[in-house]
Image (spheres, grey):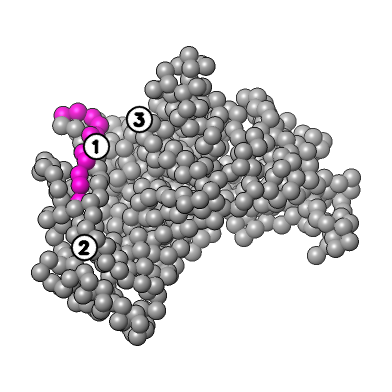
Amino acid sequence: IYEEAYFVPRPGGPTAQALRERIERARAAGQPEWMRNVAKAEVIPPAEEKGSLAVPRRGQRGFDQVPFTVAYPERVKITLKEVDQDLFDRLKALLGAGAFAADPAPYLKGDLPGPARQQALAEIPLAEHNPVITFRLRKGVLFHDGREFSSRDVRFTYDAIMNPANLSPRTADYEPVKRVETPDRHTVRVTYKRLYSPAFGTWGMGMLPEHLLNEKALAEEARRLRRDPAKFTLRDSGFNRSPVGTGPFRFKEWRSDEVIRLVRFEKYWEGPAEYAEYISRIIPDALTQELAFYSGTVDSYTAGVHQVERLRKDPRFQVFSGLAFGYTYIGYNLRRAPFGDVRVRRALTMAVNTRQIQEFLLYGEAEDITGPFVKQSDHYDKSVKPLPYDPEGAERLLREAGWRKVNGVMQKDGKPLQFTLVTNHGNEVRKAIAVAVQDAWKKIGVEVKVDLVEWAVFIQKYINTLNYDAVILGWRMGLDPDLYQIWHSSQAGPGQLNFVGYSNPEADRLIIKIRQEYDLKKQVAYAHQLHRIIYADQPYTFLYVGKATGLLDRKIAIAERGPGGGARYRKITATKTGNYTFHFNKWLKLPAVPRFEG
């Protein structure tokens, strides 16, 4: 990763050429020391760049895309060996603050209406950080249909995510991208509009095969299905039920609610897997799951919380246990009364005995969590203590907010404090939590109806349309501290992930700072501030982070070839992040527990 930075000289001040020469002299002298990071400085000739704005429609729902053009004069371009988020502060010290243009208005072309013009001016960068990542793709990697994976597939995947017709929830991850270039089949160069520290992690997603899903292929599929090609998108494609990838196993069969069957891909770039088939069975009943595992018809199993202590003691199994990457919470629709009042939200949290939920519903296989970051990470602020379980204190907060108990029910302006709590049917833990919090809230005078619905209905009818009061849900997360999609106020519309409607200007500022900070210590400091703000605001009642426990038959080991070509075996161990399936294509089930080496 390196950086290309640009700035517009102040009109009437030193020219771009004069400023470039001053920078080059400092670079040649190596003074100040940060100049050692500068690869070169050059003058970019005048150029026009086009953009567009999403402008709300007057009196209607939705947005219109309004195009605009920026006519840049000569600019100075500086190429850095490494990203430097403090570059422009350093340049101002070297060149003087007066060397930089401050007003974007002279460069905006076109007759835009007032609000759109102001929005466009706010988005025109006169000083621009452009981090650049160059990916070198491994040669000889094949898709399961035999076609070679190439840079075309990377570019296609990016374009598919950014295509509004595909309704990708990951669009915000790639909005900072300025352009994606593919100079050859095995090189991808990604240039960003601005500083964006999570950039590397976002490109770890699975890649789509362009030759199977491009515009021509989708149109042909639509015609076969007698569908309108103009309305047929990736979401409609049969690819979603019969995927093609590049991994060690290729798709063979998917019977809904029964089984997913994968078979060994003999041309996998790292060599064929040790076993011929990978079968994922869907067994709804917990007892049947356990019996299948005990009998040996299932080799890998995620234990239920009620089974962990017993199975951990069984010598036949390998056990991998650790905190999950995520948490379970109650989310409040902050657009609706009474949830707009933080005192009400805090009261609802204080009325819930989360320790009791962890101990009795989760058999102790859970811990407190007080914020939005992975608890095992440095970004999680361990100094934040959970609100106490205090039903009397909860009632005091409600009285402060203007509620009074009448016949055991909190009322305000003649209306009872009541709402509906929704969660997904089939999740017995969430169902039990719903009953527990319903009872807890009743004790402080809050009437709650519990609604259990099928998962698809839950997401489509309630979450995506923002049509709910409160929900029980959970987040599965990675180590990346970027919380933009879940917590930034711009992501609170229908179909977006900030469905609770959380909005706090300081939280927004910190979310952006975290996104743009490359110094880990500073990033952690911003994350701790954000953690404290979100917990104080209580848009969620953070219930717990669970412990995930996976089990394997002890006869399963990692198979390798020794120096003489003979087989040798290693124990399966978890990574620092708790992932024990990292080398699952090298697993081998043996007739007996092997003798391990190393």
Number of other residues with Cα within 10 Å of mark 2, as a class: few under 14, some 14 to 19, many 20 or more: some
Asked whether 244 or 376 is in front, the reply is 244
Q: Residue at x 81, y 38 (%)?
A: 296
Horizontal side of residue 229 vs 356, given as left or right: left
- Label 3 is placed on what type of residue? Thr
What type is the residue that disc 2 sits on? Answer: Glu
Magenta residues?
A: 59-70
Does residue 61 show up magenta in the picture? yes
Classify residue 36 as left or right of residue 205: left
Residue 65: image tag: 1
- Name the front one of labels 3 and 1: 1
The residue where tag 2 is placed is: 74
Does the magenta stretch mainly form a helix, a strand or a loop? strand
* Residue 262: image location, x then y, percent: 70, 34
Of residue 14 and residue 531, the one placed in the foreground of this image is 14
Quarter holding the C terminus?
Answer: bottom right
For residue 262, above or below residue 14: above
The numbered dot on residue 465 is: 3
Do the residues under discs 2 and 1 have CB atoms within 8 angstroms? no
